[in-house]
Image: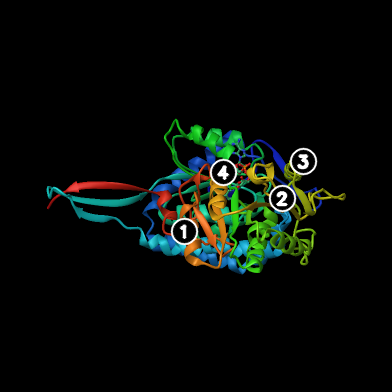
């Protein structure tokens, strides 16, 4: 683990990191105990005053330098992600670039933290505001984007002048440890970035959130865990940002270019093997084009080469662990039992590793499990709709509201649909929404706050207002 600028063991032993392509252990990493958590919070709290007082340009330079190191070490980063998480090298290279870009973007934002000066409406005084870092930030990240979910938080936190304790997912601690090393090489002072590893995340967060020196919690992961953390953050009224689960609808309107929609669907569904919070979860396709869309999507998904993430030829790697495969299989089985038809895949094969095949389900009832629950795998359920209104109504029937996709040849019609969707992000004739310079986040049970874009740094800043006159 990396605490106070030094590598250390954990006081609670160690745990194995598995290779999902084989199911075999890769290596073991330290398990942080309660005293390690206290050491990390202490290191972050001690480093805070100097880091907050460091010139914004210097803070930005550390991030900029880390962006450069990540770019130089892109192949190492990509290989490590494919090894511990299983995604294809193409996906990992894409993530390495995407992750590094958060540091470049927030290096540029560090020097643009502003305040304002106004005259009160009554004219009685001036209103002066300035921004200060929130303080020690606890960052909790999931396994599906081991680099980008960490840089999307570390970038704005450091730019704002906060110090951090990062706890990566137990499945993918190695990428986070490499990031800590690169940040340190780039000049992040000891204690500014600390990384704790554990396979007992509940114990770690309980200790950290009970420590009143921690002032910020930023979590990316499932809605259930996010809700529990929100409760644990309540006693100290922590500043909380949550990026939670999704159930993205992918709307194909009757006038859509079906080939373009299939191309977008391949990206929205199959990037990361479907293990993305923004992954298209349910395809709401107009009945006049549904058969053509299902046939073309099944043809494209059926061509994907399956294999270990670290094989150069692989286009679809394994799922992250055995539990993930069981969960996907269960949703597919229940959806078929509810009346859907598998036109591609639909059952787990033999052999080692945690693989689930590319699957297309046609004639899916809109209330079937694959259409209502987050799948997090390479399964595309297709639901027929007969109008834009029905598509919007079904899209909004979920308690989640992270992202959506809309395909139509009519831009105005598409924008009208976008306006009505209860989500934080929409891809309009685009299968990818993620961009470090755009605000990422959801509504309803998909989260609180935005990451990236101009808003991203706000999550790590407080506002002080001074009433004055001169
Ligand atoms: P998860 O909630 O199981 O784990 C996320 C993080 O929380 C990990 O670091 C894990 O160790 C930790 N954690 C797990 N149980 C905990 C507990 N009881 N107390 C404290 N911490 C705990 O989620 P996951 O399976 O790693 O990731 C998949 C989920 O993340 C999906 O629902 C996906 O939609 C969501 N996700 C959301 C976004 C987004 O930006 N909205 C991005 C990626 C993933």
Camera-side residue: 417 or 117? 417
Left or right position of 20 against 158: right
Secondary structure at badge 2 equals loop
What's the CA distance linking mark 2 and mark 4? 19 Å
Q: Which residue is mark 4?
A: 398
Q: Which residue is mark 2?
A: 363
Residue at x-position 59% and y-position 52%:
249
Secondary structure at badge 4 equals loop
What's the CA distance linking mark 1 and mark 2? 27 Å
**Mark 3 or 4, nearer chain start:** 3
Q: Which residue is mark 1?
A: 416
Numbered marks: total: 4
**Can you tell which of label 4 and label 1 is closer to the viewer?**
1
Q: Which residue is mark 3?
A: 337
**Mark 2 or 4, nearer chain start:** 2
**Can you tell which of label 3 and label 2 is closer to the viewer?**
2
Q: Mark 4 and mark 3 in contact (Cβ < 8 Å)?
A: no
Q: Which mark is residue 464?
A: none
**Disc 2: CA contacts within 10 A as few (<14), some (14-19) or many (>=20):** some
Residue 3 is at least partly visible in this image:
no
What's the CA distance linking mark 3 and mark 4? 21 Å
């Amino acid at each position: 683990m990396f605490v106070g600028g030094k590598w250390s063991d954990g006081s609670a032993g160690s745990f194995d990191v598995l290779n999902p392509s084989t199911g075999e252990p890769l290596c073991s990493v330290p398990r942080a105990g309660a005293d390690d958590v206290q050491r990390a919070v202490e290191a972050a709290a001690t480093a805070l005053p100097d880091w907050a007082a460091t010139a914004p340009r210097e803070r930005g330079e550390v991030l900029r330098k880390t962006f450069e190191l990540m770019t130089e070490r892109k192949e190492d980063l990509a290989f490590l992600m494919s090894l511990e998480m299983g995604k294809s090298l193409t996906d990992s290279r894409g993530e390495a670039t995407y992750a590094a870009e958060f540091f470049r973007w927030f290096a540029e934002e560090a020097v643009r933290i502003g305040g304002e000066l106004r005259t009160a409406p009554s004219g009685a005084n001036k209103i002066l505001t300035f921004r200060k870092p929130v303080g020690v930030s606890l960052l909790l990240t999931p396994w599906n984007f081991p680099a980008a979910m960490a840089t999307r938080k570390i970038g704005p936190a450091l730019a704002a002048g906060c110090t951090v304790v990062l706890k990566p997912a137990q499945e993918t601690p190695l990428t986070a440890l490499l990031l800590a090393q690169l940040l340190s090489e780039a000049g992040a002072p000891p204690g500014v970035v600390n990384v704790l590893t554990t396979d007992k995340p509940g114990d770690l967060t309980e200790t950290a959130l009970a420590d009143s020196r921690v002032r910020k919690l930023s979590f990316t992961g499932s809605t259930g865990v996010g809700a529990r953390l929100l409760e644990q953050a309540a006693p100290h009224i922590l500043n909380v940002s949550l990026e939670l689960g999704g159930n993205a609808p992918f709307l194909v309107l009757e006038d859509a270019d079906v080939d373009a929609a299939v191309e977008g669907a391949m990206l929205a569904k199959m990037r990361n093997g479907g293990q993305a919070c923004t992954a298209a979860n349910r395809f709401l396709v107009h009945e006049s084009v549904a058969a053509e869309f299902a046939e073309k999507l099944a043809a494209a998904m059926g061509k994907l080469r399956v294999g270990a993430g670290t094989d150069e030829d692989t286009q679809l790697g394994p799922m992250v662990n055995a539990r993930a495969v069981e969960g996907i299989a269960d949703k597919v089985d229940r959806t078929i039992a509810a009346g859907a038809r598998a036109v591609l895949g639909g059952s787990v094969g033999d052999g080692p590793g945690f693989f689930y095949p590319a699957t297309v389900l046609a004639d899916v009832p809109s209330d079937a499990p694959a259409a209502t629950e987050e799948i997090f795998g390479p399964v595309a359920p297709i639901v027929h709709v007969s109008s834009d209104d029905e598509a919007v109504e079904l899209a909004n029937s979920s308690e989640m509201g992270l992202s959506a996709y809309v395909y139509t040849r009519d831009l105005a019609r598409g924008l009208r649909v976008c306006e009505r969707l209860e989500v934080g992000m929409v891809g309009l004739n685009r299968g990818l929404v993620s961009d470090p310079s755009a605000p990422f986040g959801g509504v309803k049970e998909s989260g609180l706050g935005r990451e990236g874009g101009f808003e991203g740094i706000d999550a790590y800043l407080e506002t002080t207002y001074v009433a004055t006159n001169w």
